[in-house]
Image: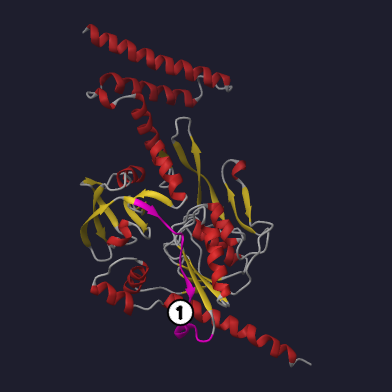
Amino acid sequence: MRRRVWVWLVGALVGFNLLVGYEVLVHSAGATTEDPGYGALSVFTRALQLVRQDYVDEKRVDYRNLTYSALKGMLASLDPHSQFMEPADYRDMRDETRSEFGGLGIVVSTKDGIISIVTPMEDSPSFRAGIMPGDQILRINGLVTDRMKVQDALQLLRGDPGQKITLTIYRPSTKETKEYNLQREIIKVSSVKDTRLLDPSLTGKLKIGYARIVQFNEPTSQELDHKLDDLEHQGMQALILDLRFNPGGLLNSAVDVCGLFLPPHSMVVYTEGRDPAQEHEYYTSRTAKARTMPLVVLVNGESASAAEIVAGALKDLNRAALVGETTFGKGSVQSVIQLPDGSALRLTTARYFTPSRQVIHEKGVTPTISSTLSQDEEKGLLLRHREGALTPAEQALAKNQPDDQLSRAVDALKSVLTYSANQPAASGTER
């Protein structure tokens, strides 16, 4: 009995000290105890005190675990894109933006409350296994995900290289449920893929280049710049930039990519938030040397975030035609704010707008030329993107399914190049 009284007194003193500290803080900021924030925090500290003193398993109630759990719940309650990151998660995020990270290579989000795959990252275990965008994760190592927050799912998906993990996946398009046994690995992702001149059987005598951006990371613009140099040395006359299935990435990377095609100091995007400090305009570099060849951008419903910024800016500024489908509609800004212990908040602080003040969030960017792929055509496209062994059935599907969006893009560029070639002759006949 005396021990229980002693525990209660210690807990009460801890709660009292927290409240006294907060009282000093609010008064120093000009607030009073009537401030609603004070009352809410007093409830929190009382709950913390009760959990600390009475919860059955004392190993689970240290201050760090309880504080982290509270922060995770708080951030997750705001929107699907805000989250609290523990120090290890924050390090993983920084590694990922540098195009190197450990895990399965799956970009996930919540859709209708279900943990869903936005896209499997190329050259990753999930991509090679055949996991598809839109697949739903039912279980992770046997743990049911129906009430799981995104950040909790990410913690289970990430881990040291070499560790095995089992995913139970439901595919809505086929109504199939399947288990995937994967192994985590260090994933080095090249953000620019498949740069080449398209086959003359598709383009005729014209030399049309093709480049696909997988996601927007720190080195993306430099990588794309070098690969476009190579294509120009091969005589490239026009370019198709493929942003389909691109989940986004870094805002500055998107701006720098636009700088490869837009005049110096062109506004690419601007942001507005509750705080006036979040109102910001983003411009291409004043020293950028933009390419002027005709340009078409391919987009679909899985083109999101930074990919939508690029597509929206190039369309708004009449620099490129968009071919494909309306994009995903993820137009919110997440600011990453590091905390003193190495953890961080990923907090939605603003929304993106295109140069012509078009809203991206929940609306997406509409294409100039609408073109959709059937389910089999889309699957064939993803199989062609996959590097690794395909089953005979997959090989047949990848080979036989057309890419009508790419064909429409080629047709659009043919028209532009043909028109440009005829311009001098036409002007010469004027009287």
Q: Is residue 57 above or below residue 185?
A: above
Q: Position of residue 358 (x, y in %)?
A: 57, 59
- Spot the residue most to the top: 2
Q: Is residue 320 above or below residue 343?
A: below
Q: Position of residue 346 (x, y in %)?
A: 46, 42
- In terms of depth relative to the viewer, which is nearer, 132 or 327? 132
- Near mark 1 (Cα within 10 A), the count class, few <14, some 14-19 or many ≥20, is some
Q: Is residue 269 left or right of residue 397?
A: right
Tag 1 residue: 407
Quadrant of image for the N terminus = top left
Secondary structure at numbered mark 1: helix
Q: Position of residue 259 (x, y in %)?
A: 61, 61
In the image, is residue 255 part of the stretch drawn in magenta?
Answer: no
Q: Residue at x 27, y 52 (%)?
A: 183
Quadrant of image for the C terminus = bottom right
Examine the rendering and report whether any part of residue 9 can be seen.
Answer: yes
Q: Residue at x 76, y 91 (%)?
A: 430
Circle 1: residue type: Ser
Q: Is residue 363 above or below residue 93?
A: below
Examine the rendering and report whether any part of residue 32 can be seen.
Answer: no
Q: Residue at x 21, y 59 (%)?
A: 177
Q: Position of residue 243 (x, y in %)?
A: 47, 65
- In terms of depth relative to the viewer, which is nearer, 243 or 372? 243
- In terms of depth relative to the viewer, which is nearer, 206 or 418? 206
Q: Is residue 379 left or right of residue 211?
A: left
Colour treatment of the image: secondary structure
In the image, is residue 194 part of the stretch drawn in magenta?
Answer: yes
- In terms of depth relative to the viewer, which is nearer, 228 or 306? 228
Q: Quadrant of residue 290?
A: bottom right
Q: Residue at x 56, y 52 (%)?
A: 252
Q: Quadrant of residue 76?
A: top left
* Magenta highlight range: 186-205
